[in-house]
Amino acid sequence: MDADDRPIGRVTRCSTRGFVGAVRLPEPEWPVFGTFCRAEAQQGRSQVIGLVYDLTIEDDELARQLAASEALSPEQLADSQVNRQVPVEYHALAVGYHNRDGFTQALPPQPPLTLAPVHLLAAAQVRTFTERLDFLPLVLAVPEIPVDDLLAAALKTAAAVRPESERRGYLVRAAAECARLLGRDLTRLESLVRAIRP
Amino acid sequence: MGLNLPQILHQLEQMGAALAEHEAALRRLQPAAAKALEHAASLPPEELAARVTRAGDRYRGARPSDEPVRQRFPPPAVDAGLVIAGADGSQIYPDRHAPALYYVIQVGSLAIDLGTGRAPQTRTLPEIHFRPEDLYDEDGHPVNNAVINGRRDALEMKALADWAETAAGRPFLALLDNGLLLWFALQVREQQQKEVDRVLKAYLGHLDGLRARAGAVAGFIDRPRSADVLALAHLATLPPEAINDAALRANPFRGLTDRLVFEKLLEPGERSACFIDSSPLNRDFETRGHQVRFFYLKTDARGTIARVEVPAWVADDPAALGRVHAGILEQCRATGGFPYALVRAHELAVVTNEDRQQLETYIQQRMLEHNLAPRTSQKATTKRWTRGRRKHRV
Amino acid sequence: MTNASELDAYFGSRPDETPLGMVVGGALSSGLLVKLDPRLSIERLAVGRYVVIQGTSGRKFFGIVTDIALDATNPDLMRQPPAPGDAFAAEVYSRQVAYGTLSVSPMLMLDADDDQPRPNKTVPAHFAPVHEASAEDVERVFGAEDEKHLFLGTPLDMQAVHVNLDLERFVERSSGVFGKSGTGKSFITRILLAGIIRAAKASALIFDMHNDYGWAVKDEAGREFKGLRQLFTGGQVSVVTLDEETSRARGSKVDRVLRIGTQQIEPEDVEMLSGLLGLSDVQTGALPFLRRRLGPGWIDRLLSDTPDEELAAMVEDERIVSSTLGAIQRKFEFFRRMGFLVPGAGDDAVDDIFNRLKKGTSVVLEFGRYGNTLAAYILVANFLTRRVHERYVRQKNEAVGRRGDEPQPLVIVIEEAHKFLDPVIAGHTVFGSIARELRKYNVTLLIVDQRPSGIDDEVMSQIGTRVTCLLDNEADIRAVFSGVSGAGALREVLARLDTRQQALILGHAVPMPVVVRTRDYDESFYQWLGAADDGQRKERARRGSQALFGE
């Protein structure tokens, strides 16, 4: 895999369904809901592909103090937003893995190791990975997380890495696949289509 | 297993009672202390000065400067275009239980351009020391942790001097999270003199740099426990001929702090008069023109008193002193009594336990690459066994 | 699908062909249900088109699209469609959730080792891919154009492919051309007859009511087209007219004028006209008696102005009621008005016509002004057909007894056929007999009609090939499909035909029903028949002589 993707910390806990990573980064660089990342597994022989679905920010006393203060200066505000490396914890859902044979969209055979480095998936890889849509049922099947919003965000991410001329076509294809999977539940399908609309 | 609370709980009962009693005692003393200070203020300055001279080298209390001892100074305006820098350091001390012997100093600092709305520039500079000349003194003894603290202090001052350079022409204020004097020197003087001298030289050199660039510098001490001014007040109550060691030691205000006195005296934003620090350490500083002075400052509406130390060349320059006064107050507005620049400097500098463990993992990997077998001590290993684990569930 | 099998090599490969869809349900009796590929625009499809279904193990099914419908995986979609103007949602839904279906009637199947398609007896497997039929497929089914096959038209949206009618099978049974007025029945009939005549498959006796067949026919817009006599200048077609004056005025080339002697008319000839003449049952029943008593000149005598003693005597003897006789006489005035009826024994017209037909010449009988009189049309058609048919029966029996040749096959063309073949009279008329005989005597009908529901069911069931243009009356549509198994599914196809130049052909002469855009009746058709325009011919001759003589 290439080196133009950004590191976003390390795995702190994991299972085959997904993993949790932690990183200290200023706010503009935090991993975003619905983006793809990868974590090393099997001693580097494979990478688990994750879809970020939850971000939590650790307790920050200073931020709370400043928020409550009436005397916050613009420099202090900018400092918090741009400079402060806040520890961010993110949860990623395993939606596939990558090894010598390329991408596979199924639960990975082994989870990543604790402290394995995590990187954002580079644009070209996101495009290749999302070309196939077999990961959609993996997302839809997960209980207790907002799968519809997550799916919409993931598909928007996937569309954004494609050239302008291909975006609509891709979204139609992906939404049609969702329609096939969600055919029974029209209301849900409607909201999803509305969320994905280019 | 954790602290054996049940065993300790009944001891806490006694503690509570003692604290209450102590508190009451101090309260009873306060009026007398206030009166003593008033009395000291009422004396003509030469008389006060004469008493101080009579007290001799062993007197460790505050010495008055030109400013009347009970004078209160209101806050001046903040300089336009002021640049405020803060620096703080943290360290990993050498650990003989670790896989290898090393220590780390990390200095975090930042510079804020007031009034621009821009995010401050930040800098975090770590150093790892592993060579024998850093780890051992000339006699082959492992270097003292206090020396490492001193090296850290020097690096903090260096960071501030570097920021002063980039401030180029704009009014500049450097803040340190600590007093200006190098207290580590008192802890190691005898054995590691050379190290001390080296550190002192570097430190004072950075102060020279700051002075050359017309930057103001101040050390900020939060929750000061000193009673230097009380000592002066006590001295003032003694008739000159009665001044001797025994009389000095019989300070009735023992237990009180200057902070408690000035809490009553100062309004929010006001500073006290400047005093001169009597510590022997100040003599080295004095020789280089950096005699350390101090004043007390009420930083906020809640009444928090801080002790601020400045070199003489700042104290004697009304503009520079005003810059320190106003700058610190400005920095304390949003954070309630502690300067923002120092909060952030600390954050930039801090090294956590996890950081340390990660570092040691990497060190071990490097050692393995060079065919060295890193061995943790058995003590460290057993400590690791007793830490908890957590399972992940999606 | 496009694996290089032997079969594909045999039929020719299909590069870049996307299936229309796949078979997802249905039955042999009710037709197959095909789910359309969502990438295909349903609006591009039409009923009446041909499809080929690829079964397993190399078998192919040929079918015709009989219905097109919209469906959805979730019935709620009808109540909760995407918002109007939301093109994105519409596109998404129409890929998987909402889709189109076709109903296909499978008609023929072709196994890998067959060389001819056979009637269909089973259904293709689930998910068999369905393709639009190619030109080769259609040719495989219909055969190539040759002496025995007439190119009649092109299938829908396949201008390059020719649908060829098997002429032998067409004339083997009676056939019909149906359609409401203005849909071009006579054009189609002319093409069929031209094909039959050119291929010399049969002679035709055409009762041309409105000058649509013989010479210089005109369409509704007044454009002129060549009649059969003009198309066949080598003597294969004769024009016989009842109304010489009108024919000559029109410029028609007339080969013979037909006069019928009143003495040639018999009561059986008149019975068919009872309704039109207004004769009651009693009056009709009296006719044979009158003939017997009055002899061959019975009509002349009934019409005579001078009193007839014998008639008076019959009345007095009460052999006939006076009012009945009176009524008959009054209604027989009709005969006087018919200029082609001459008193007396008439001439040998019937023999003449019969001989022409025997030789292989086709005869167009022009009615001139009499074409507007239905009674005249029925009288003459019935008169001639009875007598010609009689001669055919005799000749056929002689041939069976090995004492003579087989008579030349004959096709009798009648218009307004429901007047001749309605359920009430079909049993009594020669036309009904001919239809039921199934060419026992080498005579078949070609009926041209716009009210097939008026035709007796039993007769209809004997009509082998039906060429149908647009019909919009339910009863007529049902009538056209009666007696043809599995044709009910084509109802939708029939109802959607264009108003002109489109026809559905089903029955004996085609292996499977087909919708065609009929070929144009124009210069190219004339040329194909070898009857190019006079002007063109002169031009060719001139050029030819120029080439020879350098003028």
Image (cartoon, coloured by chain):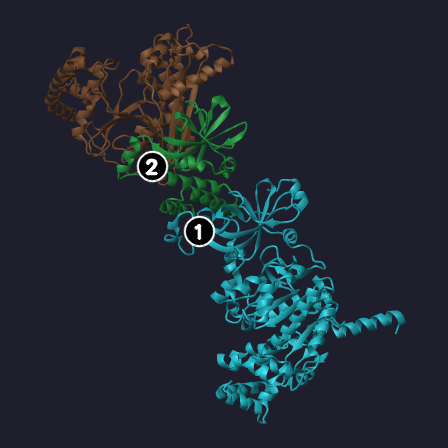
- Residue C536 lies left or right of residue B373; in this view the side is right
Which residue is drawn at the image coordinates 27% and 30% (left, top)? B338
Q: CA distance from mark 2 to mark 1?
A: 61 Å
Q: Check disc 1 and report the residue beneath it.
A: C71
Q: Mark 2: which secondary structure?
A: helix
Residues tagged 2 and 1 counted as in contact (Cβ below 8 A): no
Which of the chains is brown?
Answer: B
Label 2 Cα neighbours within 10 Å, binned few <14 / some 14-19 / many ≥20: many
- Residue C222 lies left or right of residue A132; in this view the side is right
Q: Amino acid at mark 2?
A: Gln
Q: Which mark is residue A76?
A: 2
Q: Mark 1: which secondary structure?
A: strand
Percent x, y for residue A72?
30, 38
Q: Nearer the viewer, residue B353 or A127?
A: A127
Q: Quadrant of residue C205?
A: bottom right
Label 1 Cα neighbours within 10 Å, binned few <14 / some 14-19 / many ≥20: some
Q: Colour of chain C?
A: cyan
Farthest front residue in view: C317
- In the picture shown, does residue C435 fall above or below C108? below
Q: Amino acid at mark 1?
A: Asp
- Residue B328 lies left or right of residue C506; in this view the side is left
Q: Nearer the viewer, mark 2 or mark 1?
A: 1
Q: Nearer the viewer, residue A57 or C64?
A: C64
Which of the chains is green?
Answer: A
Percent x, y for residue C174?
61, 64
Quarter the C terminus of chain B occupies: top left
